[in-house]
Image: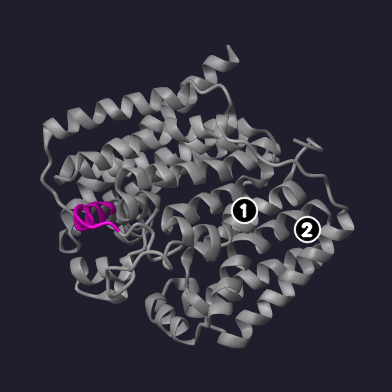
Amino acid sequence: MLSVKRTLFVGASLLAIYILFFLSYANLVGPSFGYMGFGNDFSSSRFFFSFLFVVFTISFIAFCKNDFDRYICVLLFVFVTAPNIVIFCFMPSDYIIVLWSVLCVPLTLLFMRVLPVFKTKTVSNDFQCKFLWFFLVFLSMLVFLAHGFKLNLDVFMLKNIYELRLESRESSTKSSVYAYFTLAKVICPIAIIWAFDNKNKLMALFSVFVLTYLYMTTGHKSVYFSVFIILAFMVGKNSHFDKLKLFLIGIVLLFCILRLLSEFFELTLFESLFIRRLFYIPALLNIYFFDYFSDLKLYYSGSFLSLLIDYPLDRVPAREIGLVYFNSEDMSANNGYLSDGFANFGSLGILISIFFTSWVFKFFKAYEVSPKYYGIIFVTFYAFQGSGLSASLFTHGVFLLTLMIPFFLRGSKKGI
């Protein structure tokens, strides 16, 4: 009976999320943001075709037996499947985008089941503490030497964000960039939860301070919100399903509130900021990436095969797309692994991206990472969603995080 209730709850929540996505696009994104390229030409045939995929995906996720698997699939549905399927109903795009936005869900679970992970032993609590303190201080100094200290309170009101980003880009160094993302995506998130677990108030406060400083320095909203996401997942019962339920209820309530604010109070800024910016711009960029790279492939010449293959563009893909489709390379249209995989190797490239992202999630699952760390899993997922594969793994620190999972995040298992 409990399993049936969980299945119905997950299925109903995902269907509600899809409907809210659809309403946001039909009432706000499509009609109001055509100047950005969003179409508003609803097609009943495309809707029927895509709705079948929605039903299939929701059913597949709802009937998953493992709650950790469900969580990963829900993240894929919310950030990849649903927005790409909805936008397909309102503007013609390549069917392959819809296909891969659906296939990424079962393929991720397949790879998570078959891929191996290495065996390790645990490390002492004292070593963990010293390790985290060293990298918190050392990496913070690298960022500070490049940017200095800026008390920029406007960013907390989401003002002058893009001006700040341009300014920080000019003062960045290669070492400060790596230090910044390693702190924001790996060290600080781990340190916050580790500090709460071990009642180390000084480390917790310092980690939050560092994340706040990083946000004031660069204006990356994901860094600002990551603190709240990490702390939110520490609330409530410590079970996989309870964290999944917390996420689903939170998403449904957030989407409902944003829609109501827009519909009845004409406060569209918040729905635009969250729904359009976080979900529909990546979906729109998928259309642009697939269009631009339909007859041109990079073959990873801009990353780990740069020494073997000549790079064919004058600028990185994000700036190329920004220049071609938004008439400004400063737009820097970074996008997730569907776009990056296709730009590099077509459909095979998407499969490669799914393969490696699944391997990272397998480490979380294999080492029975506590549900209280679901916020870190979310931050990791979002790194893949917003950047190319190599950038996520190395620049954003996901590869380092994966290596740290067995030593800092493991649950009850002492060896795998």
The quadrant where residue 42 appears: top left
- At mark 1, the secondary structure is helix
Q: What's the amino acid at mark 1?
A: Ile
Q: Earlier in the sequence, mark 2 or mark 1?
A: 2
Residue 39 counted in the magenta span: no
Return the x and y of residue 383 as percentages of the image width and height. 49, 56
- At mark 2, the secondary structure is helix
**In which quadrant of the rendered image does the C terminus lie?**
top right
**In which quadrant of the rendered image does the N terminus lie?**
top right
Q: Measure how far apart labels 2 and 1 are at the Cα level.
A: 13 Å
Residue 377 seen in the figure = yes
Mark 2, Cα crowd under 10 Å, few <14 / some 14-19 / many 20+, is: some
The one of 268 and 247 positioned closer to us in this rendering: 247
The quadrant where residue 151 appears: bottom right
Above-or-below relation of 396 to 381: below
Q: What's the amino acid at mark 2?
A: Ala
Q: Name the residue under label 1.
A: 230
Q: Give the range drawn in magenta.
A: 286-297
**Residue placed at 56% from the left, 35% from the top?**
244
Q: Which mark is residue 195?
A: 2
Relative horizontal placement of residue 11, taking residue 152 as reference (left or right):
left
The quadrant where residue 183 appears: bottom right
